[in-house]
Image: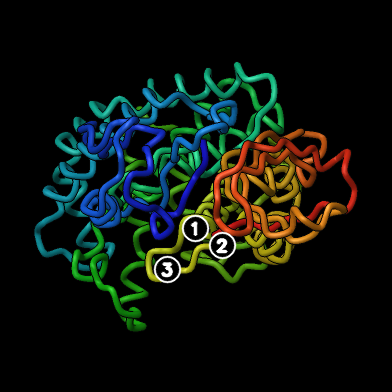
Amino acid sequence: MVRYNLDDVNEDMVLGESIFLQNGELLLAAGYKIKDEYIGLLKKRGIASVLIDVEGTESVVPETVISTHLQQSMAMSLSKMETVFLDAFSVDLEGAGAIDDFIKKNKHHLNKFLTSSQIGPKVEKMIQEILNQPITIYNMAELMQAEAGLFYHAINVAVISLCIGKKFHFSMEEMKQLGVGAMNYDLGMVAVPRKILEKKDELTKKELMALRQHTVYGYLLLSQNPLIPATSAAVALQHHELQDGSGYPRGIKGANRPPHKDFSLKNTIHRFAEIVTVAETYENLIAGRRHDSRVMSAPEAIKNMIELGGTKLNSIIVKALVSIVPLYPTGARIRVTNAPASNLIGYAGVIAKNDPARFNQPSIMLYESRNHRRIKPILVETAKMPGVQFELIL
């Protein structure tokens, strides 16, 4: 199977994956022949790419971090929680004081829905699936794509965060606290005025200040719930704090240390928040920011992350992320730019398999000539063929 950007999908290509909405509804089933109206529907739902069943590439199976069933289940829970909280905050409230009063007055009602979302138990299932994998390879493209909501990024950010936690050998309790914090890190967005969230143009300074209050709102919502660990609530408050103190809401600094428990650290960013900050930054670069539609390739995003390490992001956590993210995700389309056999230059193919020890030298499968004609697939192990160079087709 090959992952195509929707702009490159043609009629009669065969869909290689089923597409679900956040409410669990099946939008399109695997095996469907793509029609122009389907492409328009997918774009309207915020879906940027799909897996296409290309003859001869059946052996190409993109890595999955968590099961499709669990992704769908978590997306449904987040969608329901989003609806409930947006309805609750539909009243015209401005400022942390007004939000704080509202949360206190409606504490029981809000806690009921936060608890009934079953996020905690589902985070535990997510952790088990991640821990049961012998090797963690995080492939962003294979996490569920669905119509965008306020919490669209939460599943991706939580998975990245937990993969990083696994890399640092966190205990089960640490993983749970990190996972709950990551799943709820943007909860405070429900209290931000809808006109700001839905604005397409660049935000004014006043609107940006109001948007940044979501960190405080999220903390207020989570910290008053006895079932939410304080460390998880800290993620909501601090996930926009930066190592050099230029973040918000408090402008506290990080220590650029490994994210292990250390009681000697005072007045610094919480280690779980540092992990979520790295995870969210990478996810934003790959998937596109709320007010910035530019999407980067994995190599571009990793380069950007490394540049931010030390000043904005915890450099040690960034290194951990880089070690589990393949530069060339399995299933991604590529084009040969140089090869010992010059007749292969210009051929198109797919990343067939990654070697965790050599992420920059994957096996590729060529299935299309430079004239865009289908050929019998050719498997090329780039680690054994020096001189083969290729680029991702974005």
Q: Which amino acid type is marked by label 1?
A: Asn
Q: CA distance from mark 3 to mark 2?
A: 10 Å
Tell me the element at label 2: loop
Residue that numbered label 1 is attached to: 284
Split into 4 quadrants, where in the image is the C terminus? bottom right
Classify residue 212 as left or right of residue 295.
left
Q: Determine which of the numbered discs, if any, sits on residue 293 in the image.
A: 3
Q: Name the residue: 78% across, 55% down.
A: 389
**Foreground residue, 313 or 93?**
313
Label 1 vs 3, first from the N-terminus? 1
Q: Quadrant of residue 8?
A: bottom left
Residue that numbered label 2 is attached to: 296
Q: In this figure, which colouring scheme has been used for the structure?
A: rainbow
Q: Nearer the viewer, mark 1 or mark 2?
A: 2
Tell me the element at label 1: helix
Q: Name the residue: 26% across, 33% down.
A: 76
Query: How many other residues sit within 10 Å of disc 1, few (<14), some (14-19) or many (≥20)?
Result: many
Q: Are marks 3 and 2 in contact (CB under 8 Å)?
A: no
Q: In the image, residue 218 lies at what x, y percent?
A: 35, 50
Q: In the image, residue 33 lies at what x, y percent?
A: 30, 39
Q: CA distance from mark 1 to mark 3?
A: 10 Å
